[in-house]
Image: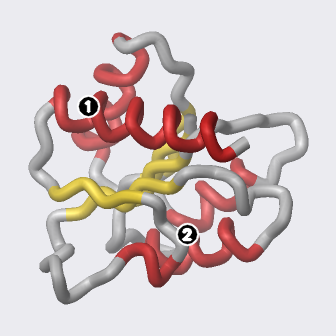
Amino acid sequence: MLSADDDPDIRRLIERVLVGAGHRVMLAPDGQAALDAAFDEDLDFDLVILDVEMPRMRGLDACRILRDDPRTAHLPVIIASGSLASPYVDVTEYGATASLHKPFTPAQLRDAVERELNAASTRR
């Protein structure tokens, strides 16, 4: 699992919750670092979580790049952000499979991840 957020506290929270749920997690501080990791041939991810507003590259832009590349097009992508003002932003237009509004609880994070992993396994 790969997660990018520019807030170190959010990165630590995501890591603690998901590692506690039995997942391996790699953290990135921005969208470009997430793309670098996603396209690293030595790494393999089953899901990506992206914040919207980050330095170097926004999460929505990183999501679109992931979706457009055949190596990563299959990955579920959760957009996690406090700046989403649904219904004004449709994250599926960028290729995301789900959104998670900040602040989220650990249970909401775990549920969103499990839901997306289960949906991805039925699509294969």
For the residues labelled 2 and 1, say whether their Cβ atoms are less than 8 Å apart.
no
Characterize the local packing of mark 1: few (<14), some (14-19) or many (20 or more) Cα atoms within 10 angstroms: some
Residue hosting label 2 = 63
Q: In the rendered structure, which amino acid carries the disc numbered 2?
A: Cys
- Whole-percent x, y for residue 82 in the image: 16, 65
Circle 2 SS class: helix
Q: In the rendered structure, which amino acid carries the disc numbered 1?
A: Leu
As measured in the structure, the alpha-carbon distance from the residue carrying label 2 to the one carrying label 1 is 21 Å
- Whole-percent x, y for residue 72 in the image: 74, 57
N-term-proximal mark, 2 vs 1: 1
- Whole-percent x, y for residue 16 in the image: 32, 20
Mark 2 vs mark 1: give the one in front. Answer: 2
Q: Is residue 9 above or below residue 80?
A: above
Residue hosting label 1 = 13
Q: Residue at x 67, y 75 (%)?
A: 65
Residue 96 relative to residue 101: left or right: right
Residue 114 relative to residue 67: left or right: left
Identity of the residue furthest to the front in this view: 122
Identity of the residue furthest to the right in this view: 41
Circle 1 SS class: helix
Residue 29 relative to residue 107: left or right: right
Q: Residue at x 32, y 40 (%)?
A: 112
- Whole-percent x, y for residue 22 in the image: 46, 11
Q: Nearer the viewer, residue 70 or 27?
A: 70
Residue 102 relative to residue 44: left or right: left
